[in-house]
Amino acid sequence: MRPSLAPRYVHDCAPELAAGATTRLVPQTAAAFTQPARAAAWRSLPSTYVVCADDPATPPDVRREQAKRAGTVVEMACGHHPFLTRPAELAAVLRQVG
């Protein structure tokens, strides 16, 4: 596991999940952060934004600002990856808004 990533991205994961998640990480191009999107489905389709309130990688206030464009906003007390740490809770949220 890359130690510098664990505190930011998988701090609330079980150790075996954290180890597995970090071994699958690959570098991401900077273009993902600088290149404008050519299309945004949230403009024409119902959308939900899950704010991860305990996320040290993307501060919750940043997430809340990003979430303003979504039709529905849900906050979960979790870190960056709720699909790893709280899969049942996340699935329930998605079923409720879906």
Image: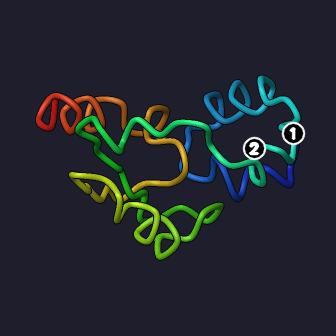
Mark 1 vs 2: CB contact within 8 A: yes
Where does the image place residue 89, in percent across and percent down from the top left? Answer: 26, 38
Residue 63, compared with residue 79, is above or below; it is: below
Asked where in the image residue 45 lies, by quadrant, the reply is top left
Q: In 3D space, how far apart are the residues under numbered discs 1 and 2 (Cα atoms)?
A: 6 Å
Q: Secondary structure at mark 2?
A: helix
Determine which of the numbered discs, if any, sits on residue 3 in the image.
none
Front residue of 51/1: it is: 51
Which residue is located at x 65 percent, y 61 percent?
57
For this view, does 9 lie left or right of residue 88?
Answer: right
Residue 62, compared with residue 18, is above or below; it is: below
Front residue of 49/57: it is: 49
For this view, does 98 lie left or right of residue 2?
Answer: left
Determine which of the numbered discs, if any, sits on residue 29 in the image.
1
Q: Amino acid at mark 2?
A: Ala
Front residue of 93/54: it is: 93
The 10 Å Cα crowd at callout 2, few under 14, some 14 to 19, many 20 or more, is few
Q: Amino acid at mark 1?
A: Thr
Residue behind mark 2:
32
Which residue is located at x 76 percent, y 48 percent?
35
Asked where in the image residue 47 lies, by quadrant, the reply is top left
Instruction: Give the quarter of the figure containing the C terminus.
Output: top left
Which residue is located at x 15 percent, y 37 percent?
97
Instruction: Give the quarter of the figure containing the N terminus.
Output: top right
For this view, does 80 lie left or right of residue 32?
Answer: left
User: How many numbered discs sit on the rendered protein?
Assistant: 2
Residue 68, compared with residue 20, is above or below; it is: below
